[in-house]
Image (tube, helix red, strand yellow):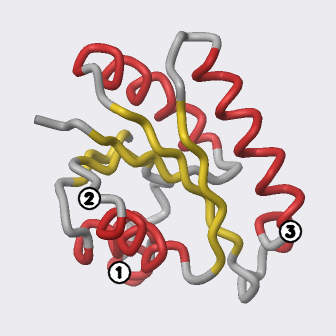
Amino acid sequence: MFKTVLFPIDQSYESREAAGTVASLVKTLGSRLVIVSVVDNTAENSEMASPEAIANLLQTAKDLFQQQSIDAQVLEREGKPAFVICDVADELNIDLIIMGCRGIGLTEEGSASSVTNRVINLSPCPVLVVP
């Protein structure tokens, strides 16, 4: 059913926490795993605007999954994260997106502008949000 799973990552705690759920589902379902991280050059947070930081993050994630006998494809893209994540899902015929939720959306304004909320609304496939 979920042959290919997309796991968008950043350097957040929530992203790291979601990795366990991703590993468990991918192993259980025998899915192919694609990890994507997005360089957002317009972001106020400069650490995620660095291609070097993204490359290190992706390598660390790939190594983490490799330790669990999961071979993952990694992608680095540029642009607005929510739009890029959905574009990658569409391009690669992703069956499921699994992502962490920052929990910053407790107000109506915060939830409307969160990457997770935008992905949920724009995604071409189901989205599993790990709290």
Residue positioned 85% across, 56% down in the render: 53
Q: Which residue is mark 2?
A: 93
Give residue 19's position: percent from left, percent from top. 51, 30
The answer to the question of whether label 2 and label 3 lie on touching residues, with beta carbons closer than 8 A, is no
Q: Residue furthest left?
A: 1
Question: In the image, is 93 to the left or to the right of 77?
Answer: left
Mark closer to the observer (2, 1): 2
Q: Tag 1 or tag 2, which sits nearer the N-term?
A: 2
Q: Quadrant of residue 48?
A: bottom right
12 lies above or below 27: below
- Using the numbered discs, state the Cα–Cα distance from disc 1 to disc 3 in whole angstroms: 26 Å
Q: Which residue is mark 1?
A: 112
Q: Quadrant of the C terminus?
A: top left
SS assignment at label 2: loop
87 lies above or below 54: below
Residue positioned 53% across, 33% down in the render: 72
- Using the numbered discs, state the Cα–Cα distance from disc 2 to disc 3 in whole angstroms: 28 Å
Residue type, label 3: Ser
Q: Which residue is mark 3?
A: 50
Q: Residue furthest top?
A: 68
Give residue 31's position: percent from left, percent from top. 30, 29
